[in-house]
Amino acid sequence: MAVYNFKSSSIKTGVIRKTIWDQVSTFLIPAGYTLGGYSGGFLTTVNKLPFNTETFSVLGTGLSTARNYVCGYSSATNGYAAGGYDGTTLGLTTVDKFNGSSNARTTLGTGLNSGRTGAGGVASSTNGYAINGRDSGGSYRISISKMAFSDDTFTTSAATTSNNRNMGASFYNSTNGYYAGGEDSVGAYISAIDKLNYSADTRSTLGTGLSNSVSGPTGFSSPTAGYVAGGVNGGGRFTTVNKFLFSDDSRTTLGTGLAAGTYGAYNNIFSTTAGYMVGGNTAASPGGITTAYKFSFSDDSRSTLSSALATASYTDGSGGFSCLG
């Protein structure tokens, strides 16, 4: 968490003191963000969910271009919306950067080093990662793009994934990133979970994968575990929520799953105390929903937020990030 250095700052007047406090208090309010998606057309919309109020708002400035399948990840101070599909070009290289304090958007002059649609997003303290996805020719990737937060430059990770796929769920902690499920180049649904070790830049595959082979599941992370919720395969949509302990990667399945089988909800929306499943696609509402569910990490109980998205929507990629300060 960033801390403002008051000792070296001028706080001689009440006006300046108030300005500094406003800046700090704004920055120290962690929030989750949804990135684009689909609602009868491709969206530029970025929804913001401050975790202290749990009330959605729509940023005045959204994505630089309307797109779906966006990969989201974040540093301590900024969030990133990488790649996606705009209805014309698969595997966009565009990367939008959102300041975690002001929410101002810039677009990186140099985007992804390899365009990706439907990639999964994870992050260490120093780097953001876009895992798998499809390129501009429609081919499925097994590679991982790695972005240094220090200067926003991209390289390719030494690690590759266990199979070529997109539309998986992502979750992560300070030492490892995970990419779960998805759909591969021959249309097969995947249950495998790949684990990226940040420090070694190596990949392993969990012995126990998802309880279902699915595309379009949703991931979020607690300080001690990662969660993968919902998804779809040829048999329909799932209500299942799997939980993976970071200590040993063991899997359990929550007794209370989703209220309805859902896929395509926005990934990576979580605070230190709860994970959120926002939007998505259900059998009753295939065009998208506005609902947001909350899973409290203390007991894994599920509740429904009183606030909802302004527009029913879903995504087919990670599609979100959280700035925790």
Image (cartoon, helix red, strand yellow):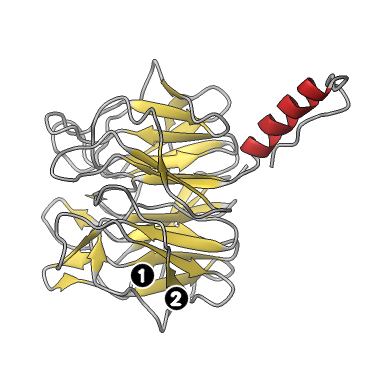
- The image quadrant where one finds the C terminus is top right
Q: Residue furthest bottom?
A: 255
Is 25 located above or below residue 148 in the figure?
Answer: below
Mark 2 and mark 1 lie on one chain; the one further toward the N terminus is 1
Query: Residue 144 in the image: x percent, y percent?
Result: 37, 40
Q: Nearer the viewer, residue 110 or 87?
A: 87
The local crowd at label 2, few if under 14, some if 14 to 19, many if 20 or more residues have their Cα within 10 Å, is: many
In the rendered structure, are the residues bearing label 2 and label 1 in contact, judged by CB atoms less than 8 Å apart? yes
Q: Quadrant of residue 90?
A: top left
Q: Residue furthest top?
A: 109
Residue appearing at x 29%, y 67% in the figure: 230
Q: Residue furthest front?
A: 14
Label of residue 251 in the image: 2
Provide the residue designation for mark 1. Answer: 209
85 with respect to 54 (left or right)? left
For label 2, the SS is strand
Query: Residue 44 in the image: x percent, y percent?
Result: 28, 33
Q: Quadrant of residue 15?
A: top right
Please, what is the three-letter code of the amino acid marked with disc 1?
A: Gly
- The image quadrant where one finds the N terminus is top right
Query: Residue 170 in the image: x percent, y percent?
Result: 40, 54
Q: Quadrant of residue 247?
A: bottom right
Is residue 208 visible to us here?
no
Please, what is the three-letter code of the amino acid marked with disc 2?
A: Arg
Query: Residue 196 in the image: x percent, y percent?
Result: 47, 51
